[in-house]
């Protein structure tokens, strides 16, 4: 697996950008985005989604993670949300400011005849740095931690076996994998304005400087996994 190393100057730029709204203007931008929800393409219905399997992952800002999994063939739908904590019905403000034990996460609906859970685990590990504790890129805090959720013993074994493979192949050198392997309990869908955020907000500074470069790095390394129409 190819590890992309980010130049120091780019890291300095990223340090000033975050998935978390820090001031009034940022929150106004989010609010304006919420008002444009009527322009979102219609998603599959709950009845249609029941035909597919689900997988759950957390690996930093869900704007980035959602876009990555949506580009993968066999993935039918992806929702941004919150998981990994005990608090009920968390909000974006509560999670993004670290006021809960939840992490920003995604719910992935996929066709197992096209893409396997093992391959989704490969996508997960291949699209973020699982060696940075409570951090992903410019986003810091336990709400951005790396988590691979499992719903049964088979999925747990797949995750652990793949982590062992990464260690044996010395993919990350002397850096330890800090990804949590956690039984799935509950996923809370994020507010409507967070869904398809990367697609609907291409000029957002975080999307331009963090999400899109991260998506492009993934696409370069996983060309055979991409949908034909992946943007």
Image (spheres, rainbow, N blue to C red):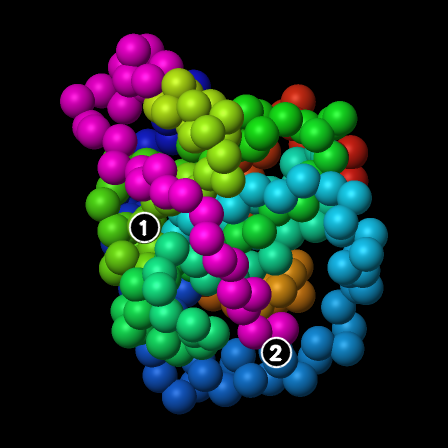
Q: Are marks 2 and 1 in contact (CB under 8 Å)?
A: no
Is residue 142 one of those drawn in magenta? no
Kindly report which numbered mark, 2 or 1, lies closer to the viewer in this rendering: 1
Q: Furthest-top residue in view?
A: 169
Residue occupying image coordinates x 53% and y 79%: 30
10 Å neighbourhood of mark 2: few (<14), some, or many (≥20)? some
Question: Mark 1 or mark 2, which is nearer the start of the sequence?
Answer: 2
Which of 159/76 is in front? 159
What residue range appears in magenta? Answer: 164-192
| 179 inside magenta stretch | yes
Q: Position of residue 112 (x, y in %)?
A: 70, 30
Residue 225 image point, x, y percent? 65, 27
In this figure, which residue is indicated by the disc labeled 1? 145
Please name the residue shown 75% across and 26% down the image: 113
Question: Is the N terminus in the top left, top right, bottom left or bottom right quadrant?
Answer: top left
> Looking at the rendering, in which quadrant would you find the C terminus?
top right
Residue 33 badge: 2
The numbered dot on residue 81 is none
């Amino acid at each position: 697996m190819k590890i992309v190393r980010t130049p120091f100057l780019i890291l300095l730029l990223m340090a000033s950008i975050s998935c978390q709204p820090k001031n009034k203007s940022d929150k106004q931008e989010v609010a304006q985005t919420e008002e444009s929800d009527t322009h979102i393409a219609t998603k599959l219905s709950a009845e249609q989604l029941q035909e597919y399997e689900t997988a759950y992952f957390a690996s930093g800002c869900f704007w980035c993670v959602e876009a990555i999994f949506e580009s993968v063939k066999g993935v039918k739908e992806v929702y941004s949300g919150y998981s990994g904590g005990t608090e009920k019905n968390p909000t974006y403000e509560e999670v993004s400011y670290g006021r809960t034990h939840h992490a920003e996460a995604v719910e992935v609906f996929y066709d197992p005849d096209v893409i396997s859970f093992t391959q989704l685990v490969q996508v997960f590990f291949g699209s973020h740095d699982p060696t940075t504790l409570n951090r992903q890129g410019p986003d810091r805090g336990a709400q951005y931690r790396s988590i691979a959720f499992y719903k049964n013993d088979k999925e747990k074994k797949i995750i652990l076996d793949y982590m062992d493979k990464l260690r044996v192949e010395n993919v990350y050198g002397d850096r330890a994998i800090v990804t949590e392997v956690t039984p799935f309990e509950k996923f809370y869908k994020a507010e409507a304005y967070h869904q398809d955020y990367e697609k609907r907000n291409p000029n957002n500074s975080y999307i331009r400087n963090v999400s899109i470069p991260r998506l492009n790095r993934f696409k370069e390394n996983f060309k055979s996994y991409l949908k034909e129409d992946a943007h």
